Image: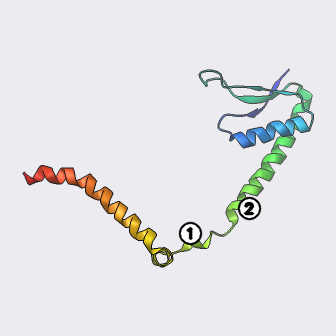
Amino acid sequence: MAKLLFRLRNVPVPEAQAVRTLLDDNGFDWYETHAGNWGISMPALWIKDDTQWAAARACIDAYQQQLQTDVRAAHAEPPAAEEDATLVARFLRAPVRLVLALIGILVVLYFSVYPFMRLFQG
């Protein structure tokens, strides 16, 4: 009898594809159910043979542990120097960009407030 192996709701596409590939590469007999037309069914990967469930689950758990380690390592890197820069440092590095951004902000602010100012002028 089939047994639920891996729920696919809210799982990123690359991770779901990696799990599918993992199951295929290890020779597990599995199938996939979709959410259906209205999205109310459960999208999942199912193992056809109950005796293979523990081994398949162990493969998925090992993959997810490795994925977790990789993501944590990627986020543990120190931020780039540009992210730490102060406003003064950014101005000194690209003064034209900052001035144009400020002009753009003032233009948007002017056109946002101007109709209301005309109401109170009489």
Residue 105 appearing in the image = yes
User: Which numbered disc, 2 or 1, marks the residue closer to the eye?
Assistant: 1
Residue 57 visible in image: no
Colouring scheme applied when the structure was drawn: rainbow
Indicate whether 12 appears above or below 1: below
Crowd band around label 2 with a 10 angstrom C-alpha radius: few (<14), some (14–19), many (20+): few
112 is higher (above) or lower (below) than 11: below
**Picture layout, residue 63 above or below residue 104:** above
In which quarter of the view is residue 76 placed?
bottom right
Task: Say which residue label 1 marks.
Answer: 83
| Whole-percent x, y for residue 5 in the image | 79, 32
List x then y, in percent, for residue 38: 59, 22
Residue 79 appears at what percent x and percent y?
63, 68
Residue shown at 31%/59% (left/top)? 107
What is the secondary structure assignment of the residue under circle 2? helix
- Nearest the viewer among 113 and 95 is 95
- The residue that appears at 77% across and 38% down in the rendered structure is 17
Query: Marks 2/1: CA distance?
Result: 19 Å
Quadrant where the N terminus is found in the figure: top right
Residue with the mark numbered 2: 73
